Image (cartoon, rainbow, N blue to C red):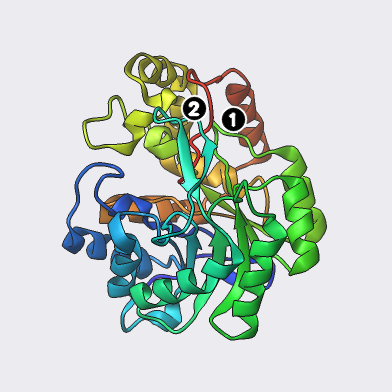
Amino acid sequence: MSTLPARRLAGLPTSAIGFGAMVLSPGMYGEIDDRRAVTALRAALDEGATLIDTADGYGADGHNERVVGRAVRGRREEVVIATKFGFRIPDGAQAHRFPVSYAFGELAVNAEPEYVRGYAEQSLRNLGTDVIDLYYPHFPDPRVPLEETVGAVGELISDGLVRHLGLSNVTAEQLRGAHAVHPVTAVQVQWSMWQPVDPELHAAARELGVGLVAWSPLGGGFLTGTVKEVTEGDFRRNLPRFEAANLRTNYDRYAPLRGIATDLGLTPAQLALAWLLHQDEHVVPVPGSRTPAHIAENLAAARVRLHPDTLARIDQALSRFTPEGTGALLGD
């Protein structure tokens, strides 16, 4: 097993780059079988990734969590398991809907405190473990004060079912309110070369000593420089930036960044991840891939050091790179 440079999310030590498991469920990035999914996860562990990010809403009936559970069996002590809740709404519970920039227009959650323990117990069964290391509400519930949801997670921490509280897709104000109820270890936030972090949220996290977990750090795969189209059965077909015309435009606009990667002897994915690691010493990206070779390539970015002149060159190129297609990639 390889060892990657380490980072800390508040009091939680992890590898500098983790692994986002969402890509390992069918219907997310096309079809995949469980054998390939487990192979990919174990490749990430072998390469030194210790933070594995999943959610009860990835795939049908907790599929993604179950795959993660299979992959880490016998290696649980090596892994920080992070999972999210709120999308697998129990029978009889109300769906609380909110708009998103996806083609289908809205998502639905239920993060009422009375359901939080049941969510966690089901995730523990799916994962085959007796404790969740980092537990997040997937999205703030528009009908429930976030502080109430956080209070329910705090009870799970007191009872030993969860070790650390995380938040996902929140504002600076929501982070501050939640942190006043229970210390927050990490905020999961969309952050990449084509999706800047909200500066107010970033500042609040730094002030409170909260770590940042960057989801979609490769822009849904776009920043690898290899995505020129998305096929049927791929979740990205719902995202405006991946519509055919927008994708062609974005690919052309991103050419200068691909050129910088070539000059440095890096892949575009490695450049994107290394750049992100240089933005904050407490950010941990969680890229996902289905291919062991690509996983090794991504994780190798944790060892890349970029000269200040190179960072300035990258920032200059990014200042001219405005993605075509409205909205962020909400929900990874």
Q: Circle 2 sits in a helix, a strand or a loop, which is it?
A: helix
Residue 216 can be seen in this image: no
Residue 73 lies, with reference to residue 66, above or below; the image says: below
Q: Residues within 10 Å of mark 2 (few under 14, many from 20)?
A: many
Q: Residue 21: where, in percent of width, then height?
A: 37, 57
Q: How many marks do you count on the picture?
A: 2
Q: What type is the residue that disc 2 sits on?
A: Leu
Q: Residue drawn at (34%, 73%), measured in percent from left and top?
A: 126
Q: Circle 1 sits in a helix, a strand or a loop, which is it?
A: helix
Name which quarter of the figure residue 205 lies in: bottom right
The numbered disc on residue 99 is none
Residue 288 can be seen in this image: yes
Q: Residues within 10 Å of mark 1 (few under 14, many from 20)?
A: some
Left or right placement of residue 185 versus residue 317 in this view: right
Q: Residue 2: where, in percent of width, then height?
A: 40, 70
Lower sequence index among marks 2 and 1: 2
Q: Residue 202: where, in percent of width, then height?
A: 72, 46
Residue 25 lies, with reference to residue 65, above or below; the image says: above
Quarter of the picture containing the N terminus is: bottom left
Residue 325 lies, with reference to residue 72, above or below; the image says: above
Name which quarter of the figure residue 200 lies in: top right
**Which residue matches tag 1?**
314
Q: Residue drawn at (44%, 76%), measured in percent from left and top?
A: 121
Q: What type is the residue that disc 1 sits on?
A: Ile
Q: Which of 117 and 66 is in front in this view?
A: 117
- For the residues marked 2 and 1, what is the alpha-carbon distance in whole angstroms? 7 Å
> Answer yes or no: do the residues labelled 2 and 1 have beta carbons within 8 Å?
yes
Q: Residue drawn at (42%, 32%), measured in percent from left and top?
A: 262
Q: Which of 134 and 161 is in front in this view?
A: 161
**Which residue matches tag 2?**
257
Q: Residue drawn at (66%, 45%), measured in percent from left and top?
A: 279
